Image (cartoon, helix red, strand yellow):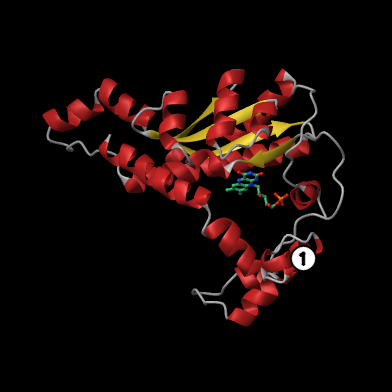
Amino acid sequence: MNETLKILQKRRSVRAFSDKALTEEQVSLIKDATLRAPTAGNMALYSVVEVHDQSKKELLAKYCDNQPMIAKAPLVWVFLADMQKWVNYFTEGGSREKGEKEGLASWRDPALGDLHLCMQDAIIAAQNAVVAAESLGIGSCYIGDVIENFEGVRDLLQLKQYTVPACMLIFGHPKSEPTGKQTPRCPQEAIFMRDSYQSPTLEQLESAFSEHEQRRRDSKVLPFNNTGSIADHYYFKKHTSDFMEEMNRSTKVMFDHWCKG
Ligand SMILES: Cc1cc2nc3c(=O)[nH]c(=O)nc-3n(C[C@H](O)[C@H](O)[C@H](O)COP(=O)(O)O)c2cc1C
């Protein structure tokens, strides 16, 4: 196995960090790798807010479903889907006026397609950062809850109409060597489909997630006194949880903010 594949295979999320700061050189290397990610039309439809201010980190930890590790992370990056810079550039650079005056194009407000593309850019760039960090021995973890409490995050980071959080990463040196097995994954045939979508049968789902189920069973966290299935676990702990309710509320506000200002 080559070095790249080895790094991809051994990566795991790291949530406990040592106090050791990342060096400027390490951060710069991760930034360069982030920037080399593919980007739609080479427009860099994303920006990254690097959060240094400790009080902001603490508020982010609170907004992100109370995850204290965020406040303790040496490096915190919020990836934004960013069409604002192009709206500004089109406007201030005169393209918008030229289009109108010369009858070449009428102005179009960025809409959901633009948002989707910007999100793709941001998330692809983030994954480059994860892999680059891993290659330097630096751990990372995505924080999906950054899409909760949109109003709070918007005000905290002074977001504009066409900048919304796509994802968030925390980085740091792992506090200790990882112990235990990596998290399981579904087998290839449960994920990759040929030519069209094929709805998995119940049997196939049970088989695909059997390792996940066993792991949860071993750690005695399944519902109904550990007799529940992995589906019960995700259904009751995630799918019908308060935080998913909040994510959906917040994302609606976020998308309205993008579309309506
Ligand atoms: C979109 C996304 C959101 C995530 N959000 C969180 C989070 O808010 N908190 C957390 O501790 N881990 C979070 N994770 C990490 C996952 O829990 C982790 O990737 C998963 O359990 C598999 O473990 P592994 O990364 O160690 O392989 C997130 C991962 C992704 C991809």
Quadrant containing the N terminus is bottom right
Residue 37 relative to residue 153: left or right: right
Cβ of mark 1 under 8 Å from ligand 1: the answer is: no
* Residue type beneath disc 1: Arg
Residue 260 relative to residue 14: left or right: left
**Disc 1 packing (10 Å; few <14; some 14–19; many ≥20):** some
Judging depth in this view, the residue of 253 and 39 nearest the camera is: 253
Residue 54 relative to residue 197: left or right: right
Whether residue 219 is situated above or below residue 227 in the rendered picture: above
Judging depth in this view, the residue of 242 and 135 nearest the camera is: 242
Q: Quadrant of residue 87?
A: top left
Q: Which residue is mark 1?
A: 217
Quadrant containing the C terminus is top left
Q: Visible in this render: residue 146?
A: yes
Q: Quadrant of residue 60?
A: top right
Whether residue 182 is situated above or below residue 188 in the rendered picture: above
Q: Quadrant of residue 137?
A: top right
Q: Position of residue 155 (x, y in %)?
A: 42, 25
Residue 3 relative to residue 70: left or right: right
Residue in view at x 65 percent, y 27 percent: 71
Q: Position of residue 247 (x, y in %)?
A: 47, 47
Judging depth in this view, the residue of 130 and 153 nearest the camera is: 153
Whether residue 78 is situated above or below residue 55 in the rendered picture: below
Count how many numbered circles sit on residues in the image: 1
Q: Position of residue 156 (x, y in %)?
A: 47, 24
For label 1, the SS is helix
Q: Position of residue 17 (x, y in %)?
A: 77, 32
Residue in view at x 76 percent, y 36 percent: 16
Residue in view at x 60 percent, y 62 percent: 234
Residue in view at x 74 percent, y 61 percent: 184
Q: Visible in this render: residue 37?
A: no
